[in-house]
Image (tube, rainbow, N blue to C red):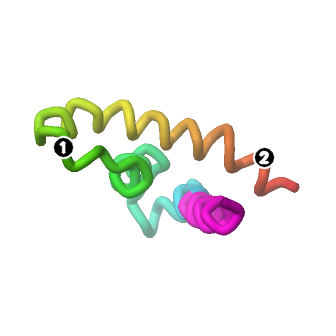
Amino acid sequence: PRTNFAVISYICDFLLDLSQPGNQEFTKMTLDNFSMIFAPCFMRCPLTDSPLEVLRRAGEERQVLKEIFNHFITPIKKT
């Protein structure tokens, strides 16, 4: 839905701004760090998954979110 897309776009835009080199001095966070922290919020595993399965997917989820930040949200920000 449009509302969900608008919220996700806003959050990603905000995190992209925070991860800019000028802000990293204050936040101590890179885009990779933000991806690691927020991936579980964006891509929650089903409750039936074992803790081991959740950990196994963590790296993939982080990489997917980082790709979304880099390739999906950035063009929208420029329009």
Magenta highlight on residue 51: no
Measured along the vertical axis of the image, is residue 24 above or below residue 50?
A: below
Q: Secondary structure at mark 2?
A: helix
User: Where is the C terminus found, in terms of image quarters?
Assistant: bottom right
Residue 21 % position (x, y): 56, 54
Give the residue pinned by disc 2.
Answer: 75
Q: Quadrant of residue 22?
A: bottom right
Residue 63 % position (x, y): 44, 34
- For image coordinates 51% across by 41% down, the residue present is 66
Q: Residue type at mark 2?
A: Pro
- For image coordinates 48% across by 59% down, the residue present is 24
Please give the range of residues in magenta: 1-15
User: Where is the N terminus found, in terms of image quarters?
Assistant: bottom right
Q: Residue type at mark 1?
A: Thr
Q: Is residue 74 left or right of residue 50?
A: right
Label 1 crowd bin: few (<14), some (14–19), many (20+), radius 10 Å:
few
Label 2 crowd bin: few (<14), some (14–19), many (20+), radius 10 Å:
few
Q: Which is nearer the eye, 3 or 28?
A: 3
- Earlier sequence position, callout 2 versus callout 1: 1
Q: Is residue 13 left or right of residue 52?
A: right
Give the residue pinned by disc 1.
Answer: 48
Measured along the vertical axis of the image, is residue 6 above or below residue 33?
A: below
Q: Quadrant of residue 57?
A: top left
- For image coordinates 35% across by 47% down, the residue present is 36
Which numbered mark, 2 or 1, is in the foreground of this view?
A: 1
> Which label number is shown at residue 40?
none
Q: Main secondary structure of the magenta part?
A: helix
